[in-house]
Image: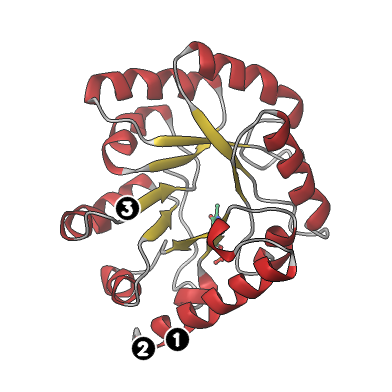
């Protein structure tokens, strides 16, 4: 059931390295976040056995069911939250995740600052940008990014980078380029962009993190449920 994962991972790593070199970039400058949402612990274990250590999940509840035991066994496992976060789950997210990629509003930033102070644990934070300004999409509007970053600074939150999901129905490269420009303008070192279908384009535009799920684990067994 999980035999394909090691071979998918090694093929993907080779393609990521080739894309980086093709763009004149150091392959080591691109981190692969393996998106394991909807897949079980056995799939994550197969990826761990193949040397993968950075994982992404889009729901707090699902990650909380899957990862605490694995994190206890693999101290270098790094878990990213890549889905929308409700303020009432901020405490659980701060306890579980090493990186929260979906900070997108001041109210959430305030809640995270409070829970980080309470827990004495400081996950690294990225701001999610609604780069295509799509009404149905999560993320701060590009025009409101400056204000959100300033609010985060005011709360004592260090933001490491930006994350985006470009519109599904348009060529992604210009959106990736725009995210990279926004990150550069704010001197943020991280740009998390690119998924199974477009990581090559994202790397060409400067992605430091690509979030890839189905190209590693296969077609997802069930559609993602509501955010959480
Ligand atoms: C599911 C998901 C991914 C991975 O998508 P694939 O197309 O399976 O690679 C990346 N980023 C986010 C935010 C996701 O929700």
Q: Give the structural element (helix, strand or loop) at label 3.
A: helix
Label 3 – label 1 distance at C-alpha = 24 Å
Task: Locate the N terminus by quadrant.
Answer: bottom left
The residue that appears at 56% across and 56% down in the rendered structure is 29
Q: Identify whether 132 is placed above or below 153.
A: below
Task: Locate the C terminus by quadrant.
Answer: top left
| Residue 31 % position (x, y) | 51, 58
Q: Identify whether 216 is placed above or below 73.
A: below
| Residue 185 % position (x, y) | 73, 30
| Residue 145 % position (x, y) | 68, 26
Q: Identify whether 14 is placed above or below 19.
A: below
The residue that appears at 40% across and 58% down in the rendered structure is 55
Q: Which label lies toward us, 3 or 1?
A: 1
Q: Give the structural element (helix, strand or loop) at label 1.
A: helix
Q: Which mark is residue 63?
A: 3
Residue indicated by mark 1: 7
The residue that appears at 60% across and 22% down in the rendered structure is 149
User: Mark 1 and 2 residues: CB-CB less than 8 Å, in contact?
Assistant: yes
- Is tag 3's residue or tag 2's residue first in the polypeptide sequence? 2
Q: Identify whether 87 is placed above or below 19.
A: above
Query: Badge 2: how crowded within 10 Å, few (<14), some, or many (20+)?
Result: few
Label 3 – label 2 distance at C-alpha = 22 Å
Query: Badge 1: how crowded within 10 Å, few (<14), some, or many (20+)?
Result: some
Residue indicated by mark 2: 3
Q: Which label lies toward us, 1 or 2?
A: 1
Residue 173 occupies quadrant: bottom right
């Amino acid at each position: 059931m999980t035999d394909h994962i090691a071979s998918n991972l090694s093929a993907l790593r080779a393609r990521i390295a080739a894309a980086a070199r093709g763009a004149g970039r150091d392959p080591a400058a691109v981190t692969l976040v393996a998106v394991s949402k909807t897949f079980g612990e056995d799939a994550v274990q197969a990826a761990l056995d193949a040397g993968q250590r950075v994982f992404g999940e889009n729901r707090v509840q699902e990650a909380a069911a899957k990862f605490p035991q694995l994190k206890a066994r693999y101290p270098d496992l790094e878990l990213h939250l890549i889905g929308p976060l409700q303020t009432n789950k901020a405490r659980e997210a701060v306890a579980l995740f090493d990186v929260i990629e979906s900070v997108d509003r001041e109210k959430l930033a305030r809640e995270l600052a409070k829970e980080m102070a309470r827990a004495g644990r400081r996950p690294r934070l990225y701001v999610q940008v609604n780069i295509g300004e799509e009404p149905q999409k999560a993320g701060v509007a590009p025009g409101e990014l400056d204000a959100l970053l300033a609010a985060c600074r005011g709360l004592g939150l260090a933001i490491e980078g930006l994350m985006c999901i470009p519109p599904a129905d348009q060529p992604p490269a210009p959106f990736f380029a725009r995210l990279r420009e926004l990150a550069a303008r704010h001197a943020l070192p991280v740009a998390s962009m690119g998924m199974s279908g477009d990581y090559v384009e994202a790397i060409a535009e400067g992605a430091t993190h690509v979030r890839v799920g189905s190209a590693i684990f296969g077609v997802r067994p069930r559609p993602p449920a509501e955010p959480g």
